[in-house]
Amino acid sequence: MERGVEKSGISTRAQLVSALDTLAVASVGLSLVGSLLTAAGASWNTRAYFAIVAMLFDIIFTVEFFSRLASGERPWLIGIGSVLPLVAVSGPFLFGWAAADMGASAVRGFWLAGPPASALAVVGALRILRVGRTLGPRGSAPRLTPILAAFIAACAVLLVGAIALQETLLPGPALADKERQQTALASIAETTTENGRLAAAKAAGVMALRVHGLVIMPVDHVVSPADYVVERLGTIEAWFPATARIMARGALEAILALAGLAAAAAYHVVARVRLDSRANRNPHDPYGDEQRPDSHSGRPDTPAGVEELAGILGKRPR
């Protein structure tokens, strides 16, 4: 009876781990969807929804991490991919959102803040490590296999690249947008008349303008703090739309999420092909070329021939 209860407990635990593995892949998949919507120009409300979902997944996997840690395991992949994003990204977002502090860097998006806070945006990308837990037998703890090591190395390269591009987000729309805004700000600074500054600001798409502490051009509509950036040059401050930078950041996060999902999918396709190829070698032998469980002394348990029996019994065959 106790053996049956023990087997039932092991089976339940394996099912739970398997379900969490599925959730891990789903969390990266939802991150990919949210990133694609961001790259397509989704509103802050949509981006906030996906940030809340990501936070819930961070909490789930953080609880799993400490539960397995308490049982004597060392689930380092789960910890890195969940605890760090929860502490550095989701936690600050939750507190800022709950306090209605829409100007907080965590709520606006760390990538819109200046360094060193902007570097925290990269921590959220560690969530792609969660798919690494599926690169092994279903329901088992991940081991540092060659494929998993290659996956982690690829993630490290992607993260280092993301950190290197953090100031410009992506060499393209974000960098071009930043340079355009700095050029416009310099043009406004060169103009000495108020009308000239207003004309230059409107031509550059400036949302609001303040010179020497005086508002020259106020905002004419309601704007979320997460949808603008402020550029300063001396005593001149200009508020620009952050659309291009936000879309570029979404594209970068989509690339990271897609890379993680592609690595997991490729692994499982290769594993399935290898399994099918072994089964096709001998359909009647589920073990293929591998040694059967009932083998002894490294040889299959097959019937002995006449000469072999004679050698064992000490008799010559007639």
Image (tube, grey):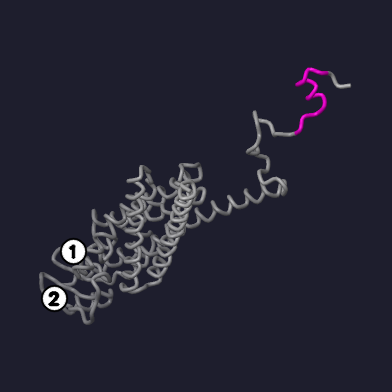
Looking at the picture, does residue 195 appear above or below residue 2?
below
In front of the other: 235 or 301:
301
Q: In this view, does 171 lie above or below 277?
A: below
Residue 314 occupies quadrant: top right
Q: Name the residue under label 2.
A: 215
Query: In the visual, does 236 lie left or right of 113?
Result: left
Residue type indicated by callout 2: Val
Q: Quadrant of residue 201?
A: bottom left
Quadrant assignment for the C terminus: top right
Report the predominant secondary structure element of the magenta stretch. Answer: helix
- Calculate the distance from the C-alpha at mark 1 to the C-alpha at mark 2: 15 Å
At horizontal 21% and vertical 69% (from top left) the residue drawn is 102
Q: Position of residue 16 (x, y in %)?
A: 44, 56
Q: Which residue lies furthest to the left in this view?
A: 213
Which stretch appears magenta?
303-315
Q: SS for tag 2? A: strand
Q: Which amino acid does label 1 sit on?
A: Leu
User: Tag 2: Cα neighbours inside 10 Å, few (<14), some, or many (≥20)?
Assistant: few
User: Which of the 4 quarters of the picture holds residue 33?
Assistant: bottom left
Q: Name the residue that disc number 1 marks.
A: 233
Residue 88 percent across, percent down from the top left:
27, 55
For the image shown, how many numbered marks are present on the structure?
2
Is residue 314 in the magenta section?
yes
Q: Sort mark 1 into few (<14), some (14-19) or many (20+) by Cα contacts within 10 Å.
A: few
Q: Where is residue 212 in the image (x, y as percent from the top left)?
A: 10, 69
38 and 268: which one is in front?
268
Is 169 placed left or right of 301 in the picture?
A: left
Q: Can residue 261 be found in the magenta stretch?
A: no
In the image as oriented, which residue stretches furthest toward the bottom? 220
Measured as percent of width and height from the top left, residue 312 is found at: 75, 21
Residue at image location 18% in from the left, 78% down from the top? 217
